[in-house]
Amino acid sequence: MESNTFIPYRTEDLTLEAQKVRVESFYKTMSERRSVRHFSNREVDEKIIRTLINTAGTAPSGANKQPWTFCAISSPEIKQKIREAAEKEEYENYHGRMSDEWLQDLQKFDTNWVKEFLTEAPWLIVIFKKSYDIDKNGTKSKNYYVQESVGIASGIFITAVHMAGLVTLTHTPSPMGFLQEILGRPENEKPFLLLPVGYPAENCLVPDIKRKSENEISLFF
Ligand code: IYR
């Protein structure tokens, strides 16, 4: 039987003033985050990517199962394979698989089936969710709230990327089973998100879109 161990825990005890400064500054920083589709081929040090992944791994998860695997790809050959497979699927999406309403909703982003960022960005991070665990002996065990847990870890990853002065795109080629195959992941791991990470291209433009106001996204009772 595992014994329960508890250790003391405290947070920083900020004054209201210090708290205001801290949250407003963080809000401003996060307001400047944008999804980027045009990457420079400028390198990003592997140690930085490792720390971003460790940061994402601090996310809360159901029963602390940490049901995620982060694959970091800088190999040009693997990036090329991923791009070819993603573009094949996206071609079908843009030529019949997506509804007219969906295509209409995407018009302002000027997206199409060509995914240059999959070979331009110095790193591709593929986040896998582990629907269940398998140990060395092949024994299966349950994971809980996998979608929520991996979603939170992904959010922390995206935040960490922004804090590093880097950019990313939450890309979901669909279907993305090919990632499991190319990266040789076991059957309990399913691709969750594909995130190119790097610097924006020199003349990078992003769509002029607005965030909803506080009134539109919140209710206080
Ligand atoms: N997966 C496609 C289409 C797409 C879908 C949504 I929802 C977006 O916000 C953006 C694109 C693609 O990557 O082009």
Image: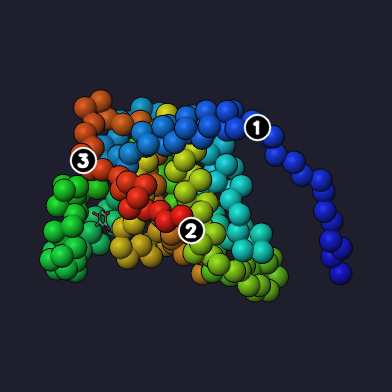
- Tag 2 secondary structure: loop
Return the x and y of residue 78 as percentages of the image width and height.
38, 48
Residue 175 is left or right of residue 95, and the answer is: right
Q: Quadrant of residue 40?
A: top left
Which residue is painted at 86% across and 69% down in the image? Answer: 1
Residue 76 is left or right of residue 66, and the answer is: left
- Tag 3 secondary structure: loop
Image vertical order of residue 157 relative to residue 16, above or below: below
- The tag on residue 138 is none
Q: Quadrant of ligand 1?
A: bottom left
Determine crowd level at label 2: few under 14, some 14-19, many 20+ residues with C-alpha closer than 10 A: few
Amino acid marked by disc 1? Leu
Return the x and y of residue 195 as percentages of the image width and height.
39, 47
Determine crowd level at label 1: few under 14, some 14-19, many 20+ residues with C-alpha closer than 10 A: few
Amino acid marked by disc 3? Pro
Mark 2–mark 1 distance (CA, rounded to whole Å): 25 Å
Which residue is painted at 36% across and 27% down in the image? Answer: 42
* Residue where numbered disc 1 is placed: 14
Amino acid marked by disc 2? Phe
Determine whether the beta carbon of the residue marked 3 sits less than 8 angstroms from the nearest atom of ligand 1: no
* Residue where numbered disc 2 is placed: 221
* Residue where numbered disc 3 is placed: 207
Closer to the camera: disc 2 or disc 1?
2
Front-lying residue, 132 or 214: 214
